Image (cartoon, rainbow, N blue to C red):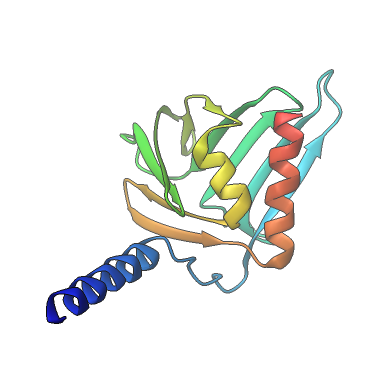
Amino acid sequence: MMKRTMVSVASMLAVAMGSAASAAPAVNDGYDWAMRVNDEERAQSAILAYEVTDTDDQPLNFRCEEGGNRIFAGISGNSPDLTAIELVSGDATLRVAGTTEVEEMPYFSSDEIAGDSPFIRAFAANGWLRMTDGRGTTDMAGTATGKQVIKRFVAFCTG
């Protein structure tokens, strides 16, 4: 009887620890996900940015062309040596490489991320991500409105 109880407690502890690792972070005060569509070009494109409205405070953005199923991450003002970032949402993790161009300010642009990748699907379902870059780890959680914006962006990109 004692052995069965210990196994049950150990199993519950493992489940609780697994849940804590993928728990949603709190929304950062003033930040939310916003989407802008550029329809001035031949093909419509969109940007999804985690930002403070009416400022240039934007730790991460994603961009895509409508229905192209290809998404690219971008970061302004990071280290000129940044060559990759890690993105996590729930149980999905993605390490994406890229290049940093330095003109007036360093700008990291990732390699292509498939719009139907497990990470993008998890990000759309969860409404948050955790990014690790050259400066550390940043949680980026959407409000209820921001979560809907993420879903619209992914639908726009994947067509």
Which residue lies at the image location 56% right of the left edge and 70% below the top edge?
Answer: 27
Q: Position of residue 50 (x, y in %)?
A: 60, 54
- In the rendered image, the quadrant that contains the N terminus is bottom left
Spot the residue most to the left: 3
Q: Position of residue 113 (x, y in %)?
A: 52, 29
Spot the residue most to the front: 1
Give the side of residue 127 with respect to residue 89, left or right.
right
The correct choice, above or below, for 52 with respect to 102 in the image is below
* Along the viewing direction, whichever of 81 and 20 lies nearer the viewer: 20
Q: Position of residue 65 (x, y in %)?
A: 72, 26
Which residue lies at the image location 76% right of the left edge and 45% below the top edge?
Answer: 152
The correct choice, above or below, for 59 with respect to 96 in the image is below
* Along the viewing direction, whichever of 55 and 17 lies nearer the viewer: 17
Q: Could one spot residue 85 in this view of the protein?
A: yes
Give the side of residue 73 with respect to residue 158, left or right.
left
Q: Could one spot residue 56 in this view of the protein?
A: no
Which residue lies at the image location 42% right of the left edge and 58% below the top edge?
Answer: 138
Q: Where is residue 90 in the image (x, y as percent from the top left)?
A: 46, 54
Give the side of residue 126 with respect to residue 4, left or right.
right
* Along the viewing direction, whichever of 51 and 116 lies nearer the viewer: 116
Labels in figure, total: 0
Give the side of residue 58 with respect to residue 33, left or right.
left
The correct choice, above or below, for 142 with respect to 81 in the image is below
- In the rendered image, the quadrant that contains the C terminus is top right
Q: In which quarter of the image is residue 148?
A: bottom right
Which residue lies at the image location 77% right of the left edge and 44% below the top edge?
Answer: 36
